[in-house]
Image (cartoon, grey):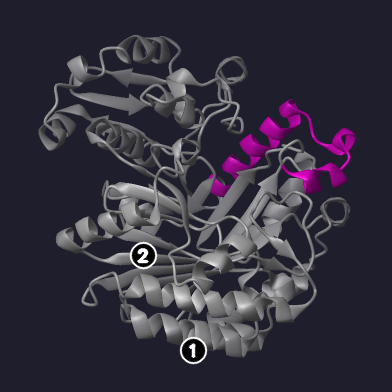
Amino acid sequence: MQQSVTFDLDLIRRYDKSGPRYTSYPTAVEFSEDFTASNYREQIEISNQRGGPLSLYFHLPFCDTVCYYCACNKIITKNRDHAIPYLANLHKEIKLQGELFDSNRVVEQLHWGGGTPTFISHEQMRELMAVTRQYFNLADDDKGEFSIEIDPREATAETIKVLREIGFNRISLGVQDFNPKVQKAVNRIQSEAETFAVIDAARENNFRSVSLDLIYGLPHQTPESFAETLDKVIAVKPDRLSVFNYAHLPSRFKVQRQMNEDDMPSSAVKLEILQQSIQQLIDAGYVYIGMDHFAKPDDELAIAQRENKLYRNFQGYSTHSECDLIGLGVTSIGSVGDSYSQNRRTLDDYNSCLDNNELPVFRGFTLNADDKVRRVVITKLICHFSLNITEIEQELGIHFAEYFADVLPQLDEFAADGLLIHNAEKIEVLPAGHLLIRHICMAFDKYMQQKQGQHFSKVI
């Protein structure tokens, strides 16, 4: 796969529309409250009949302070006692869910996200993992991929040691930007020293992978200032990097109104930052996985992409396509059987369900045959920038040109603009199309054809 990315400003201006990130297809905007806990139980039965490994996602929503750019489901509090009743109900949900899945199915992937997972105490961490192991069959350390999101301001060397002891072997650190002016504007004051101390502790405790998250498009950022942050990040050699585009949606996320819009970089400056960042990382030896992800060439993501085994789910790019994903905790999303489901969005609703010993399923979606076909096509394109049409026809039992007759004119348009090449055997996305892969995927999205993209951020 070509790792180069071509920046054509005219193409980007024309194609940079709003669109999904395709962590699922269909996307979460199609979820319906008609999908109930009863439907979810039916999908678990289907999942158990098929067997195979599992993935667990835990949402821990608490944060000590608010970051103004954040669009996550979170609860801001300095009172650590607020986590106690939530964790008690999370333990109940683990039991409810665990008893529904066959006990011989192995959990190969586990992730704690937030919020700030390290908001809870070391003892609470130990207990949560112990309860998880009581009701789920976790893979051995050398086979499982167990990760946690870390706020370096909420983690000490002892925290990292505890996390390794209870089974975590991968960490993801939020950095965003090291520039003090940017940090002040987004209300996230985080020193380089405390960030790098966590990385050092992770390596001392034999964590297998360290990933860092950055955001471009924040107030006061310039190509020069962001390049300085990136140089510091590259120097500590993380295994993976994410460079996310900040989506400013103050009408949806009130906390974003705390930032001054006049301080935001223009679209042209954001593009310059992105272009420069991609080049910096490629020059430093990282592989451009796609969209906003980078990895060292020997990282599992890069290897999976080379071997055409990369996958994409609600946590982003993944190497575990065969796993059904179980979402646990308030607002968590899962993918079980032929369905997606989401838990209750508020603490009150979540707690109420578990107080009554009920699964806290809020809404979901059951995929039909067409959804499954389109999901395969979109996933392969967004993960590998290519599609072997002959293999797809054999795998899905379709005639591609007939099935996607309405898409072919759009592919011709993309080809005329130099985004891709296509024929009866394959679709190959060219370097000019790499940044616009979300837009290319939208051509195969039946639901997007009926929408104006108002639910989504810009594709770049």
Tell me the element at label 2: strand
**Is 5 located above or below residue 333 in the figure?**
above
Q: Residue at x 40, y 28 (%)?
A: 441
User: Dot 1: few (<14), some (14–19), or many (≥20) neighbours within 10 Å?
Assistant: few
**Is 158 located above or below residue 337 in the figure?**
below
Q: Quadrant of the N terminus?
A: top left
> Is residue 161 among the parts visible in the rendering?
no
Q: Residue 242: within the magenta?
A: no
Amino acid type at mark 1: Glu
Q: Quadrant of the C terminus?
A: top right
Residue identifier under label 1: 165
Tell me the element at label 1: helix
Name the image quarter holding residue 274: top right
Q: Are marks 2 and 1 in contact (CB under 8 Å)?
A: no
Left or right? Give the position of 374 relative to 362: left
Q: Which residues are magenta?
A: 253-282
Tell me residue 331's x, y (percent): 55, 57
Which residue occupies the foreground of this view, 237 or 195? 195
Main SS, magenta residues: helix
> Is residue 448 among the parts visible in the rendering?
yes
| Total residue callouts | 2
User: Dot 2: few (<14), some (14–19), or many (≥20) neighbours within 10 Å?
Assistant: many
Q: Earlier in the sequence, mark 2 or mark 1?
A: 2
Residue identifier under label 2: 55
Viewer-nearest of discs 2 and 1: 2
